[in-house]
Image (tube, rainbow, N blue to C red):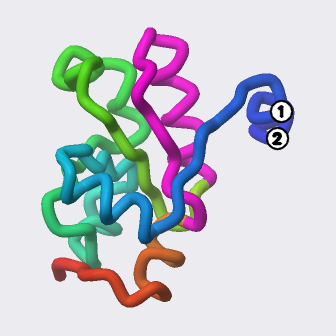
Amino acid sequence: MLGRLLSRFRVPEVTPAEAHARQQSGALIIDVREPHEWRAGHIPGARLVPLDELPARLSELDPNRELILVCRSGNRSAYATMILQQAGFTRVANLAGGMIAWTRTGLPVTR
């Protein structure tokens, strides 16, 4: 089902290096994993908003700020990106490969 939804929407993606550079320029990284996953390691400066809470917490996010969504592998965050797009957010992107790719790239992780 997720595959069919993704095929109907264009989900912009960024590489870990691009996400890191954009974060340094003011983008906010939104981590949509569960709290136990977050505690195991997350991107410094990221904000935890679990995917199941995202629709109810849209008002906490600035629609004018660039937002980059991340999860473990990129699937949940792709779905989260679509949720934000459907809510009218235009400056959103999915972190391709999620935390797996971020970690493999050697970028910082807070534990």
Q: Is 102 or 75 nearer to us in this picture?
A: 102
Mark 2 and mark 1 in contact (Cβ < 8 Å)?
A: yes
Q: Is residue 47 above or below residue 36?
A: above
Is residue 82 on the magenta stretch?
yes
The quadrant of the rendering that contains the C terminus is: bottom left
Position of 8 with respect to 69 (left or right) is: right
Q: Say which residue appears at 27% left-offset and 65% top-offset.
A: 38
Residue 75 position (above or below residue 37): above
Identify which residue is drawn at 41% across, 18% down. Answer: 89
Q: Which residue is mark 2?
A: 3
Instruction: Give the extent of the magenta segment.
Output: 75-97
Image coordinates for residue 41, horizontal then vertical, percent: 27, 77
Question: Mark 1 = which residue?
Answer: 7
Q: Secondary structure at mark 2?
A: helix
Tell me the SS state at disc 1.
Answer: helix
Q: Is residue 24 magenta?
A: no
